[in-house]
Amino acid sequence: MDKKTISRRSFIGKTSLVATGASLVGPSLFGAPAILKNYGKPNSKINGVQIGVITYSFRSMEDQSAEATLQYILDCGVSAIELIGDPAEVFAGRPENPIDMNKMWGLRRKKRDEELTEDEQKELDDLSAQQKDYDSRVSEWRKSDHKDKFAEFRKMYNDAGVDIYAFKPRNTFGLENSDHDIEWGMRMAKVLGADHVTVEHPSDDAHTLRLGKLAKKHGVYIAYHGHEQQTPTLWDTALEQSNYNALNLDLGHYVAAGNDTPLDIVRAKHDRIKSMHLKDRQTPQNNKGNLSWGTGDTPIAEALQLMRDKKYTFPGTIELEYKVPEGSNAVEEVKKCLEYCEKALK
């Protein structure tokens, strides 16, 4: 029996009580009180602020299938997500990835932090070459229609009480990608129910112009994520180019980049922020650490309270990037992050 089968059975078993409860109230819940419609489903919208999680947070969990990922989300009590492409794309039949992505991400992070050794650089170069070959096979796969499988994926998640507000497919919106790749990602986002896709800010004005035009064509926003290159003006050109260009602000990285008043950009650009990543990083003076929530320099609670008080509508997305403590796992740590949000917002 493979992991996917085990995961599917586990998911069905754990949610059977919800299904039984629904069947007891009749063949349809149409017109029933909301408490019955939502019985047994998660709700991470707290005092008007939607708290979500990016599924990248569960990258350390052994089973990465669509069913297992959904169970992780439910176990955390989260009701809305930014979906990294892997669970949905594999569910839809994407060619198997032979690359150890956790290894690649770790090496890329070390390179970004200028900590790579010579041998590690060679290893990263080899993995990058393999990635390029794999990306070409995925691009070919995307030439077929996968709407039905993505719609099936969405139904599975929505029926369990999880909405998908953002989609971040792997290696889809880059400079090297064809218009077909980019438009595929936007079309699948809409099938999933997402109103925006997310991508690393390319620092290329011609490319943000291109992406903005394609986003307008498909009626889906493209929200640019940043790391330590984030400044108050990073997004200005893209925002001027298209009303469909937006921010996927990362508050933790913004602090680590040395921006002294991080809440100012939230206030100034709230109407162009589609979602905001939450993590607790330190300032450059404190070595830019990525720490458990409440121990770093990022004003997570204050940002959430600003969102609540000003009635900003974009979600706050938990992104688990600090080291998972020994004896714990990603699900338990995301739960702690959600509890932190609840305390801040109550």
Image (spheres, helix red, strand yellow):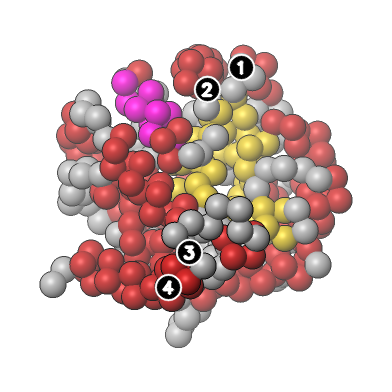
Who is closer to the viewer here, 2 or 332? Answer: 2
Residue farthest toward the front in the current orientation of the protein: 26
Give the alpha-carbon distance from disc 1 to disc 3, as whole Å: 48 Å
Assign the C terminus to one quadrant of the image. bottom right
Give the alpha-carbon distance from disc 2 to disc 4, as whole Å: 38 Å
Residue 10 sits in which quadrant? bottom left
Residue 55 sits in which quadrant? bottom left
Three-letter amino acid code of the residue under disc 1: Ser
Three-letter amino acid code of the residue under disc 3: Gly
Single out the mark in the foreground, 1 or 4.
4
* Mark 2, secondary structure of its residue: loop
Q: Which residue is mark 4?
A: 20
Give the alpha-carbon distance from disc 3 to disc 4, as whole Å: 10 Å
Residue 187 belongs to the span the image colors magenta: yes
Three-letter amino acid code of the residue under disc 2: Gly
Upstream in sequence: badge 1 or badge 4: 4
Upstream in sequence: badge 1 or badge 3: 3
Single out the mark in the foreground, 2 or 4.
4
Tell me: 315 left or right of 177: right
User: Which percent across, then down, holds residue 288?
Assistant: 63, 58
In the image, residue 79 sits, relative to residue 178, either above or below, namely: below
* Mark 3, secondary structure of its residue: loop
Residue ID at (67%, 16%): 240
Label 1 with label 4: CB-CB less than 8 Å: no
Who is closer to the viewer here, 20 or 254? Answer: 20
User: Which percent across, then down, holds residue 238?
Assistant: 61, 21
Give the alpha-carbon distance from disc 2 to disc 3, as whole Å: 38 Å
Q: Which residue is mark 2?
A: 219
Q: Which residue is mark 3?
A: 26
